[in-house]
Image (cartoon, rainbow, N blue to C red):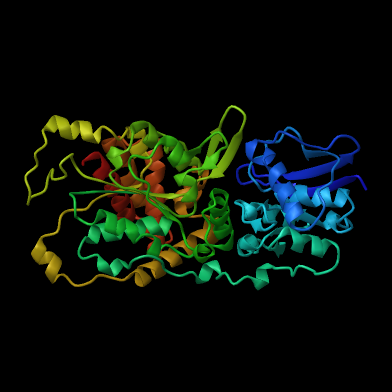
Amino acid sequence: MSLALVRTRALEGLVAPEVTVEVHLANGLPAFSLVGLADTEVREARDRVRAAIQSSQFEFPQRRITVNLAPADLPKEGGRFDLAIAVGILVASGQVAGRLLEGLEFCGELSLNGDLRPVRGVLAAALAAARVARGLVLPAGNAAEAALARRAQVLPAASLLAVCAHLNGHTAIETTSRADSTAPRPAAAGAQGADLADVRGQLQARRALEVAAGGSHSLLLFGPPGAGKSMLAQRLPGVLPPMSEEEAIEAAAVASIEGAFDIRDWGRRPFRAPHHSSSSAALVGGGAVPRPGEISLAHRGVLFLDELPEFDRRVLESLREPLETGTITVSRARRRAEFPARFQLVAAMNPCPCGHHGDPQRNCRCTPDQVARYRARLSGPLLDRIDLVVEVPAIAPEALAGSAPGEDSAAVRARVEHARTVQIARQGCANADLSAGDVERHCRPDAGGDRLLQQSMQRLQLSARAYHRVLRVARTLADLVDAPRPGVAHIAEAIQYRRSLDGR
C-alpha cells in the first residue's frame, strides 16, 4: 500500500478542526515533501519523524514521500502532527497495519528517540474526537487532561513503538476514559485561596465582595495603600460558588491552549493578576498565531487589576467589549480566532498618585490638578461598565489589633451559592450576564423601588447602561435575602455603589 490516510486535529482558537494526513510513496529519488499550509514547526517534523522512525527500529522508506495536510487552506502550527505523519509513513510502507485507522485520531510530538512529548490544546481535540466517536491516540503526559472530556476514548502512549504495537495487534493500549480519571469533580473543588476571616474590619468592602460574588458583578476598590484592597480581591475566589462541569471544561480548554493546564486546578476558578506594565496583546490575546490573553485565561474566574490607573489607557479600553460580550476576537492578517472571556473584573486603585488623598491620618502631597489627571486615566465608558465601586479606608492600628475576626469564607460562600442557585433556576445565568431584555423581565423592582430608581436616574444623570447595571445589582441584593422583587432598600444600596463612583 503506497497511500495512507491518518486523521488528526489542528488548533484554531478553542476549535480543533479535523485534518487528514495523506501520505503517498512513489518511485524516484528519495525525497520528503510536506505540503498543506504548514508553518516552520510543522515543516521541521520531517527531521523529527525520520529520526523517530529509525530509532524505533523501523525502516525509513528510501522513496519519494509526499505528505499532504488537508484541508490545504487551514493553517497548521506546532509539533502536534508528528505522530500522525509517522504513522502514515509506516502504514503506507507496509510496516504497520492500517485496519484500525478509521476509528482513531493521532496527536503528539515526537522526540528523536521515538518518545512522545505532550502538546497543548489536547482537551479541545478530545472533545472534537468524542463528538465523532473516534478514539484519540496521544502522549501519556496528556492523558489525564484529555480524559476530562465526556465520552472521549483516550489511548495514551509513551512512544511511537507502543502506537505501532497497538496498530499491529501485538500489545493493545489501555483506553482511559472520564470514569478512570483521578481528577476531582468541579463541585467538590471547594474553597480556594486565603480565608475572608483574615480581613479585619472593612465591613462595607466585605459586603461589596459578597454582592459581587453573588451576582458575578465587576468591582472597583479604591483607598490608601495598605488598607487591604489586594487582600480582599485575593479572597474573592474563596467565596465564589463551585464551577459547573461545563464551566470547568471551558476554563480547562483555554488553559490547555496556552499549555498552562494543571490537573490539580481542575474545578478551581482561575485567578489572574497581570502586572500593570502588561501590553494590550498580553491582556486580550494576540500574536502572529492568535493565543489567548489574560482575560481569556481568567474565563469563569477572576481578573484582578491592581493599580488600575497605572495600566496603559489603550490596554484598559480594550476591556470594554469583553466586559459586555464575554468573548474576544483576535484578528491578524492571515489568522482569526475567537476566545471566551466571561471573567469577573476586580480592580484596585489609590485615590491619588501618593495614595493619601482624603486620608485623615496622612497628609496628601498631590495638587488638585495631579489628582484630577490621575483619575482621568480611567475613561467614563470603562467606569460605566463597573457595577460596584467601594471605598476601602485605612484602619487605625488600635482598631486593627482590637477587632474580632469576621465571617469566614465558608459562611459567605453558603449565601453566595444559594443566591446563584436561585438565579440559575430563574434565568439560567448569573445576574451580571443578563441581557437588556432579561433585565426588564427578571429585575423589575416593586413600586417603591421603581419610584426611587426613576428619581435617581434624573438627579444622578445615570446612563441607560448604568440603569440596567443598577437593576442587576439590586436583583442580586434581593436574591441574597430571598426577596421576590428588588425593593427600596435594594435599589438604594445598588445606587449607592454607583454614587460612590461619581462622588469619589
Quadrant of the frame with the C terminus: top left
Residue positioned 23% across, 57% down in the render: 228
**Residue closest to the eye, 120 or 23:** 23
| Residue farthest toward the top in the current orientation of the protein | 333
Residue 162, image x, y percentages: 75, 63
| Residue farthest toward the right in the current orientation of the protein | 1
Residue 63, image x, y percentages: 86, 40
Residue positioned 53% across, 57% down in the render: 261
Residue 113, image x, y percentages: 68, 56
Is residue 430 toward the left or the right of residue 16 in the image?
A: left
Residue positioned 67% across, 40% down in the render: 44
Is residue 403 toward the left or the right of residue 245 in the image?
A: left
Residue 46, image x, y percentages: 72, 42
Q: Is residue 88 above or below residue 285?
A: below
**Residue closest to the eye, 156 or 481:** 156
Is residue 186 toward the left or the right of residue 383 in the image?
A: right
Res 446 visible: no
Res 43 visible: yes
* Number of numbered labels in the structure image: 0
**Residue closest to the eye, 343 or 13:** 13
Q: Is residue 371 above or below residue 358?
A: above
**Residue closest to the eye, 123 or 85:** 85
